[in-house]
Image: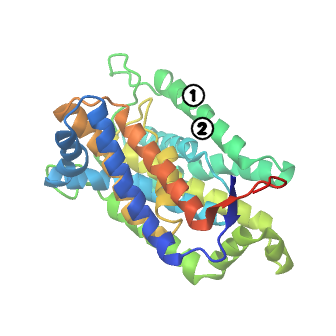
Amino acid sequence: MRFVVEPRPEPSRLLWTVTPILALALTMALATGLFAALGYNAVDSFLAFFVSPLATLNGLTELAVKGAPLLMIAAGLAMAFRAGISNIGAEGQLIMGAIAGGGVALACWDLSGPWILPLMALAGILGGMAWAAIPAFLRTRFAVSEILSSLMLTYVADLFLNLLVYGPWRDPEGMNFPQSRLFNEDETLSVLVDGTRFHSGIPLALGLALVVWLVMTRTLLGFRIRTVGASAAAARYAGFGTERIVWFTLLASGGLAGIAGLFEVAGPIGQLIPQITPGYGFTAIIVAFLGRLHPLGIIPAALVVALSYIGGENAQVLVGLPKAVTGVVQGLLLFILLASDFLVRYRLRLAHRAGVAS
C-alpha cells in the first residue's frame, strides 16, 4: 500500500475561502501549546500574545502602524504573484525607497514647505522602482530568475544603507551613533491620534490597496496580469506582451515597497537608521498569501500578521517569552496555510503497489 497524490476534480471554493481562517485558528492553538511546552503559563501567554494588544487604544493604533507597511508591500506583491512573477526582494526595495526619500529629507533639512514630503514620497517610490527594475531587466533580457536576483539585491541594499548611516549621512551631532539627522517637521508624517503613533500614512496605505484592487478587478491591465499568470502561452496568443507585464508588476511592487519604506522613516522612526524594519518585506509574502492575493483580503491579513509583531513584543514584557517566538508564530502560520492549500487542491489516496498480490 502507498499514498498517491492526485488533483481534485474541482477544488472547493468554500474551503479556499475559509482556509486562511482555519489556518489562523490552528496556528493560535499550536502556538499556545508551544508556549506551554516551553514552560510558560498557556493562558497567560495566549492572552499576552493574541488578546491584550487589542484591549487598549494604543494597542489598536500600533496594530495599524505596523499593518500599514505590510499592507502596501503585500498589495504590490500580490499583483506580481498573480502575474506569475516572484518578487522576493521587497525588503531591499523598501530599504532603497527609504534611502531615496531620506536623502531628499537630508538635502532639504534646513528648508521648510509643504512640498518637501510629497517630493520625499516620489523619491521613495522611484527608489523602490529603480531597485525592482534590475531583476525586471535581468528576467526579460537574460531570463535570470527574479527570485534569486531580487533576493540577493536585498543584501546589497542593506549594506548600502549601513554604508550611508555609518559614513557620509551620519548625524554630526549624534554622538557618533550610526543614524542620520532627525527629519524636520515638514519632512515627517503628521500624527492623527494624539498620544499615539497613528500617522497620516496609514489611511494613504489603505487608499493605495484600494487602488490596486481597482486596477486588478476593473481594468484591462488587471485582466492582462491575471491572464499572464494563469497561462503565459494563452496570453501571448491573445497578443498580451508578457515582458511588459513583468516590467509593470515588478516596478509597481517595487514602488509600493519603496513608499512603505519612506513612510517608516518619515513616520514612526523619523530618521535613517541601520535597521528600518523587522523584515516587513519578507513578512509581507505571508500577508499576500494569507489574503489570497486579493487586495481586499490583504487588508485583514495585514492586521493579523501585524498582531504577531505586537503580540510578540507584549509577550516578552508580560510573560518573558523569547523574542524569536514572533518568527516562529509567523512561520507556523505560513506553513499551515500552504499545507491547507495543498489539501484543498489535492487529495491523498491509498493505492496498491503494482505487481504486489493482494
Q: Position of residue 193 (x, y in %)?
A: 18, 57
Q: Nearer the viewer, residue 22 or 178?
A: 22
SS class, disc 2: helix
- The number of discs equals 2
Q: Position of residue 100 (x, y in %)?
A: 53, 43
Task: Give the residue at x 82% y 55%.
Answer: 354
- Residue mark closest to the camera, 1 vs 2: 2
Q: Is residue 108 left or right of residue 41?
A: right
Task: Give the residue at x 47% y 28%.
Answer: 169
SS class, disc 1: helix
Q: Nearer the viewer, residue 40 or 303?
A: 40
- Residue assigned mark 2: 154
Q: Is residue 83 left or right of residue 24?
A: right
Q: Position of residue 298 (x, y in %)?
A: 44, 64
- Numbered tag placed on residue 274 in the rendering: none
Query: Which amino acid, mark 1?
Result: Leu
